[in-house]
């Protein structure tokens, strides 16, 4: 596929066929994705390939507490897990919230789940002293994950980047033998999508790209 076509059509695939994702295809996907940039080119990311059905189900279960709060906040009209606006939803409401099957199905049903972690000993957390949630460390791992999804799309496969298991990071470490100095960045189910989207809805450039200042004029073609 043309690069721009891949970029414009790589969607969050959550429903997969029964087709396998062979090791040789997965190897090719990651072999190309590994050229993603990282801070200082230190390449601290690690990818754990999970095919075992029970391990995949356990990963889905570990995301359940996070998902309950997510969907409870959505039902209350809140922006879920927002670091600037604390939730007013009582814990007992969160505990009673049902999780849609569409949340667990991608991780349970995908033939392959990638658990991507990053070595905190090599990332440059340049925003660690700011009075907000840290973001900069993600620059050393999320480009790799996105490259994996782009490469998967190019091979006729797809997936999505999920983060619901991250609050249960200690349990994920125990499940997969991940060392303490590695942070879980994402759980990525991969497989053959049941359908291939060709048109995605995104904001027009004029709504989020400005020139000179944040409140400057929009970039035009």
Image (cartoon, helix red, strand yellow):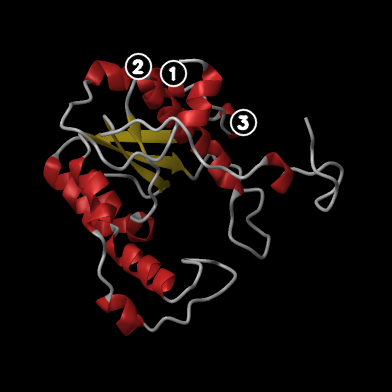
What secondary structure is marked by label 1?
Answer: helix
At 26% from the left edge and 64% from the top edge, which residue is drawn?
99
Q: Secondary structure at mark 2?
A: helix
> Circles 2 and 3: CB distance less than 8 Å?
no
How far is disc 2 from disc 3 in space, using C-alphas? 25 Å
Q: Residue at x 34, y 39 (%)?
A: 13
- 118 sits to left or right of 42: left
Numbered label attached to residue 40: 3
Q: Which residue occupies the foreground of this view, 49 or 113?
A: 113
* Residue situated in front as seen by the camera: 162 or 136: 162
Q: Quick check: 205 left or right of 183?
A: right
Residue 167, horizontal then vertical, whole percent: 37, 60
Position of residue 216 relative to residue 23, above or below, is below
In primary-sequence order, the first of circles 1 and 3 is 1
Classify residue 29 by image quadrant: top left
Q: Position of residue 14 (x, y in %)?
A: 31, 43
Residue drawn at point x = 45 percent, y = 41 percent: 119
Residue at which label 1 appears: 32
Residue 199 lies left or right of residue 110; in this view the side is right
Q: Earlier in the sequence, mark 2 or mark 3?
A: 2
Determine which quarter of the picture holds residue 92: bottom left
Look at the image and tell me whether residue 141 can be seen: no
**Disc 2, disc 1: CB below 8 Å?**
yes
Determine crowd level at label 2: few under 14, some 14-19, many 20+ residues with C-alpha closer than 10 A.
Answer: some
* Marks 1/3: CA–CA distance: 19 Å
Quarter where residue 56 is shown: top left
- Circle 2 residue: 28
């Amino acid at each position: 596929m043309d690069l721009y076509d891949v970029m414009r059509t790589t969607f969050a695939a959550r429903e997969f066929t029964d087709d396998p994702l062979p090791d040789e295809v997965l190897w090719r996907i990651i072999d190309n994705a590994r050229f993603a940039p990282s801070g200082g080119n230190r390449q601290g990311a690690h990818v754990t390939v999970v095919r075992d059905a029970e391990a995949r189900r356990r990963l889905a279960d570990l995301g359940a507490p996070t998902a309950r709060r997510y969907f409870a906040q959505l039902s209350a009209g809140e922006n879920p897990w927002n670091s600037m606006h604390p939730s007013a939803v009582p814990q007992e409401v969160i505990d009673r919230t049902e999780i849609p099957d569409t949340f667990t199905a991608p991780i349970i049903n995908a033939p392959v789940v990638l658990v991507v972690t990053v070595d905190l000993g090599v990332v440059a957390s340049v925003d660690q002293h700011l009075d907000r949630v840290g973001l900069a460390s993600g620059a050393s791992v999320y480009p790799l994950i996105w490259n994996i999804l782009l490469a998967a799309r190019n091979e006729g496969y797809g997936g999505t980047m999920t983060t619901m298991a991250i609050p249960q990071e200690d349990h994920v470490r125990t499940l997969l033998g991940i060392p303490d100095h590695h942070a879980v960045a994402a759980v990525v189910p991969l497989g053959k999508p049941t359908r291939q989207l060709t048109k995605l809805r995104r904001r027009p450039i004029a709504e989020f790209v400005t020139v000179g200042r944040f409140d400057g004029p929009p970039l035009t073609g």
